[in-house]
Image: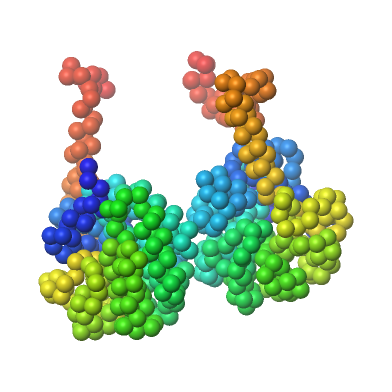
Amino acid sequence: MTSSGARLRSLMQSDMVVAPGCYDGITAKLIAAAGHHAAYMTGAGTSASLGYPDFGLATMTEMVDNAARITRTIDIPLICDADTGYGNELNVTRTVREYERKGVAAIHLEDQDFPKKCGHLDDKEIISREAYYSKIQAAVSARESADFVIIARTDSRAVIGFDEAIARCNGALAAGADVAFFEAAQTLDELRQVPQLVNGPCLLNVVHKGKTPKVELADAKAMGYKMAILPSLLYRNVLGACEQILAELATGKMPTPIGDMTPHEGFRKFGADEWDALRTAFRDADGRDAAE
Amino acid sequence: MTKAEAMREKFKSMIAGDAMIVAPGCYDGLTATLISQAGFDCAYMTGAGTSIAKGYPDFGLMTMTEMVANADTIANAANCPVIADADTGYGNELNVTRTIHEYERAGITGIHLEDQGFPKKCGHLDDKEIVPLDEYVAKIRAAVAARRDPNFQIIARTDSRAVLGFEEAVRRGNAALEAGADIVFVEAPQTICELKAVPQQINGPCLFNYVEGGKTPEIDLATAAGMGFKITILPGFLLRQAILSCEEILGELKSTGEPPNRYKHVSVREMFNRFGANEWDKLRVDAGSPKQAAE
């Protein structure tokens, strides 16, 4: 079977890849069932599902475990948040190997200092260009298959400025990265300029109420972006939906869930029919199972 | 009282006593069991051994999650207090807070936290990077504030000797005590004279790290006790033994083509007995398992 990295690369050839964010088996399955061709594993969502804010508290092991849970749940290519690579070039090397072993298609690595912060929060600390490029080089040489996609993310816009961030995108591509991820462009004009000034495929991070102005996906595609991730789309929806129904419950009346379905209808979204088939698939026709 | 709480109380009374605590290093459930069965009052979980047991050198490649998972296994296997390596606390004060929560939940008696930059290096290797004193003290304070059991031991390790000198190492040890640390671990003193000075100049209990082939002169444990150290850890003690004895017996198998006779007198059952087979069997009987009769 073609590797997930190779499939992601061929998707990028034909159209802008749109990857909604998931953080567990439920959200991953729903993304695939809705017909999306790629999914994104959000670090913020992974952190939240562990009970922590996105403050660099999730370990590489926890992130990779979550990625493994997601890749075994869905067949579409998974793009993963790999933060800073969790340390120096040695840690980056291990991080790439761990994600690749779990069948992940792509990871993004950023130039924040360890432990990192969410890209749309303030007071980020940025490492030097040299340290960043050597991490990218370490990542590129650590991958087993050349199909595994290395996405270089720079958080330098907020700290140093637009020109520096563009220079870092191009520097990272020169160091061997496959895709550039300009984090938190601040105006529509900046958003437009990124794909024009960066010498390779660009990723757009769609964050609701973040630092970047709202843009339609069709417009992002027209601007020349090759990939759009929507990390918090489902995560925030889940927060809102759960809070809403819990508030209804608190009023004392029994609420009707938005997902108004029988238990079995729910299980069918998670492969109940396929698992049910296994119950009898290996038995004799003469009804050995009838004895049970 | 939980086992973990009892072990912490036991440790506190031991460290307050006259005898120096001797804690050989373990890196899995097997070595932890052997240490407590040999009658030691304390075991130490080595980060180097944990790393190596997972196939990595001690170059800061272990995640906090991996360290804590190992600590959990060891605290469960050992019938004695367990002190664990917690490196730098795996990041800033927030990560230190989580690290303390996780080790405490794993049933560990105490951990040591050091003033190296992240990711850390083995204390007896060169080119260590040291964080400023105020950053270090903030981490110790965060650790002290994070513990839920006040008997959970915070051991402040400083790696500053090699980088900033002996005086700075002593200064950091004392600053850590003021910040609430329970024990001080001055890593890699370079002479006998420095070793002697540690318990004299530090205003609290001191830990001696016994490392074969490291930067610190090798002294007898009786000498360390005489100097006033309250606890000695021997991180690589069993690890080296395991590596060398495995290499030796593998070499014999390879060269002669036959397994050596040396350990053949130990039966499979005897080996299992070392790891609680009788206690588990008793559970089977007590539970009235019908399988028991058939076996």
Where does residue B228 sit, x and y in percent of width and height?
Answer: 84, 60
Name the colouring of the figure: rainbow
Q: Residue at coordinates 83% horizontally, 55% vertically from top-left?
A: B224
Whole-percent x, y for residue A135 in the image? 42, 64
Classify A33 as above or below B36. below
In the image: residue A94, left or right of residue A274? right
The residue nearer to you, when weighing B217 against A80, is: B217
Q: How many marks?
A: 0
Horizontal and vertical percent position of residue B253: 59, 25
Give the residue displayed 20% in from the left and 38% down from the top. A274
User: Is B58 situated left or right of A65 in this image?
Assistant: right
In the depicted structure, whether residue B10 falls above or below residue B289: below
Q: Nearer the viewer, residue A41 or A87?
A: A87
For residue B181, side relative to residue A195 (left or right): right
Residue B197 position in % (x across, y down): 83, 66
For residue A30, side relative to residue B37 (left or right): left
Front residue of B271 and B212 = B212
Q: Quadrant of residue A35?
A: bottom left
Residue A175 visible in the displayed image: yes
Query: Does A8 sit above or below residue A132?
Result: above
Residue found at x 18% / y 16%: A286
> In the image, what residue occupies the spot 69% across and 67% down?
B162
Pick whichever, B1 or A167, lies toward us.
A167
Quarter of the figure with residue B180: bottom right
| Residue A238 can be seen in this image | no
